[in-house]
Image: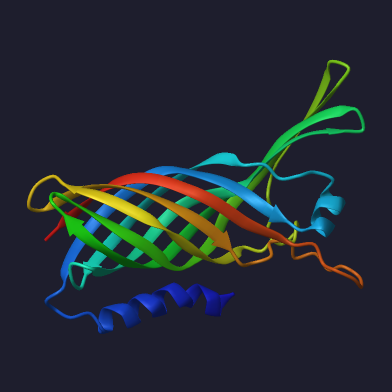
Amino acid sequence: MKNYAKLPLFLLLLLFAGVNLSAQVGLGLRGGLNFANWSLNDVAKEEFAFDAKSANSLLLGALVEIRLSNNLAIQPEVNYIQKGTKIDETILGAAVKGRYTINYLEVPLLLKVGTGFGIGRFDVLLGPSFGYGLNGKYKITASIGGVEDTTEEDLDFEKDEISRTDLGAQVGGSLGFNLGSSARLFVDGRYLLGFTNLDKHEHGAGEEPSVKNRGIALTAGLIFGF
C-alpha cells in the first residue's frame, strides 16, 4: 500500500525533472460527471445476483498543462471522482434498487497529442491513473407488496474486503477555445478503464469474481497560462 501511494509523486518528480524550461505551463480546473459503472465477470454476476448499471457521479479536479510544442503536452491532474454502480433488479419477486459509491482521490498522468486551429485546438488524451479510495457507502432498497426496507451503510475497505487502490488508464479527447491570450475554455470526454479487481475476498478453487471500475467522464473547465 505504501509503495502504491508513492507512485504518483514519483511520476510527477520524474516528469518535472525532464521538462524543458521553455515549455509553456498552464493551470486549470475541471468539473463534470462520471457515468460510473462496474465491470463484472460471470462469477461476480452469479455471486452478487445483480447486473451493474451506470450511475451519474461527481468529478472535480485541478490540472497542470505542460505544453512542449503546439502538438504535444503532458498533463498531470489531481481529481476528486466518484465511482461505483447502480442496481435496479427484480430478485425473488422484490424490486431492488440501490447504489454503491466510492469516493476517490485520483491522479492521472496524461499525454496530449493534437493541433491548434484558429482560436481553438483539439487533443487526444491518453495515460495511466492512480486512485486512492477515501470513503464510500451503499444504499439498497427492497420493495415487495408495497412494503419497503432500506439498508444504508458506510463502506469499510478492510472489513468489506474492497481494494482501496485503483490502477487504471484513461483515453479520450479535449476540444478547447481561446478566450484571450492567457485563458482557454475546454470540454473533454474520456473512457475510464480500471485494471484493479476491487473484490479482495478470498475464494476457493475455480475462477475468481472480478469487479473493476469503468466510466465515461464528461467535463468542462478553464486553463490559465503564464
Residue drawn at point x = 75 percent, y = 58 percent: 159
Residue positioned most to the left: 181
In the foreground, 164 or 84: 84
Indicate the quadrant containing the C terminus: top left, top right, bottom left or bottom right.
bottom left
Q: Is residue 24 left or right of residue 11?
A: left
Dividing the picture into quadrants, the one containing residue 126 is bottom left
Q: Is residue 208 left or right of residue 213?
A: right
Indicate the quadrant containing the N terminus: top left, top right, bottom left or bottom right.
bottom right
In the foreground, 161 or 84: 84
Q: Name the colour scheme.
A: rainbow
Residue 114 against residue 190 in the figure, above or below: below
Residue drawn at point x = 48 percent, y = 58 percent: 105
Residue 219 against residue 143 in the figure, above or below: below
Where does the image place residue 110, in percent across and percent down from the top left?
37, 67
The total number of labels drawn is 0
Where does the image place residue 182, in percent across and percent down from the top left?
10, 53
Residue positioned most to the top: 146
Residue 63 against residue 66 in the figure, above or below: above
Q: Is residue 180 left or right of residue 130?
A: left
Q: Is residue 15 left or right of residue 86?
A: left
In the foreground, 8 or 43: 43
Where does the image place residue 148, in percent across and percent down from the top left?
81, 22
Residue positioned most to the front: 117
Residue drawn at point x = 59 percent, y = 52 percent: 135
